Image (cartoon, rainbow, N blue to C red):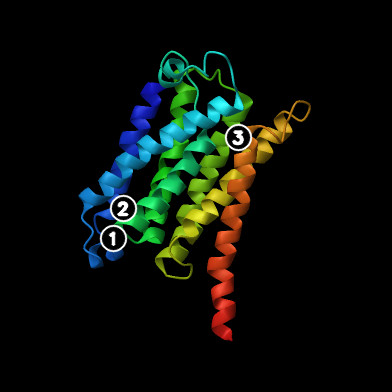
């Protein structure tokens, strides 16, 4: 688990570097690559904490409620992927607002980097466990590969051409991924599925908030502009 996470982090770091080094918006606003790296490192720490927190809330146990056990993730493994995504969103918003960085562009850039590393993480997990992974992991692996193709061939070109606003790419990904993640959890566990589970609540909040923000950004502004 830790090995996969470290490999994915360094790949994510490289993709961020590759995408941001010649980005026109970052260059025009005189934002050095080091500043983006600082954001990534701090975001990763915050995201890991939120991920661990939501895993603990979703699957509470006597051991996990102990502070030392909560921090000793090597001995008591468990992270919430959707918790990590939500934590990253919150941190990007707060950090970019405080540092006066282009929030939409940064969000899109980091989203593309995450999309690129997502299937690699699930594939590495599959290989390390010699294929003995859950059906859920296999389904998300397949969907993550499909998402890479969709964003590479359709969504990102629209963003590059300026046909969708900065930030919309990130909202589209979070909405699609949250929907896929939620429906997969639901249909694989219909009998014992609980809408009151902390992770499921977070999934729905993330899904609907992303849709609302996307619609507000892409449709409301155009509607008001026509008036």
168 in relation to 17, above or below: below
Of residues 134 and 84, the one nearer the viewer is 84
Q: Name the residue under label 3.
A: 199
> Where residue 88 sits in the image (x, y, percent)?
43, 44
> Where residue 117 sits in the image (x, y, percent)?
41, 39
Disc 1/disc 3 C-alpha distance (Å): 35 Å
Given this view, does label 1 or label 3 mark the residue nearer the observer?
Answer: 3
Of residues 20 and 44, the one nearer the viewer is 44
Q: In which quarter of the image is the C terminus?
A: bottom right
Disc 1/disc 2 C-alpha distance (Å): 7 Å
| Tally of numbered discs | 3
- Secondary-structure class at tag 3: helix
> Where residue 208 sits in the image (x, y, percent)?
63, 52
Given this view, does label 3 or label 2 mark the residue nearer the observer?
Answer: 3
Q: Name the residue under label 1.
A: 23
Q: Residues within 10 Å of mark 1 (few under 14, many from 20)?
A: few
In the figure, is residue 89 to the left or right of 188?
left
- Secondary-structure class at tag 2: helix
Of residues 169 and 60, the one nearer the viewer is 60
Tell me if residue 41 can be seen.
yes
Residue 182, quarter of the rendered image: top right
> Where residue 131 sits in the image (x, y, percent)?
53, 20
Circle 1/circle 2 CB separation < 8 Å: yes
Residue 135, quarter of the rendered image: top right
In the figure, is residue 104 to the left or right of 58?
left
Q: Mark 2 points at which residue?
A: 19
Q: Name the residue: 53% across, 49% down.
A: 174
Residue 1, quarter of the rendered image: top left
């Amino acid at each position: 688990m830790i090995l996969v996470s470290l490999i994915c982090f360094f790949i994510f770091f490289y993709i961020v570097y590759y995408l941001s080094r010649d980005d026109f918006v970052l260059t025009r606003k005189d934002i050095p690559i080091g500043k983006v790296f600082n954001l990534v490192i701090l975001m990763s720490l915050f995201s890991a904490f939120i991920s661990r927190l939501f895993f603990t809330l979703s699957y509470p146990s006597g051991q996990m409620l102990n502070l030392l056990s909560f921090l000793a993730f090597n001995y008591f493994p468990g992270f919430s992927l959707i918790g990590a995504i939500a934590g990253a969103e919150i941190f990007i918003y707060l950090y970019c607002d405080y540092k006066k960085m282009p929030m939409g562009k940064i969000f899109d850039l980091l989203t593309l980097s995450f999309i690129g590393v997502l299937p690699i993480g699930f594939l590495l997990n599959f290989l390390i466990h010699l294929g003995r992974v859950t059906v859920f992991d296999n389904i998300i692996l397949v969907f993550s590969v499909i998402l890479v193709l969709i964003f590479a061939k359709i969504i990102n070109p629209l963003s590059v051409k300026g046909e969708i606003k900065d930030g919309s790419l990130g909202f589209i990904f979070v909405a699609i991924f949250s929907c896929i993640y939620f429906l997969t959890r639901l249909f694989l566990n219909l009998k014992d599925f609980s809408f009151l589970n902390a992770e499921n609540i977070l999934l729905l909040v993330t899904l609907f908030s992303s849709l609302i923000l996307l619609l507000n950004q892409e449709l409301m502004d155009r509607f008001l502009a026509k008036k």
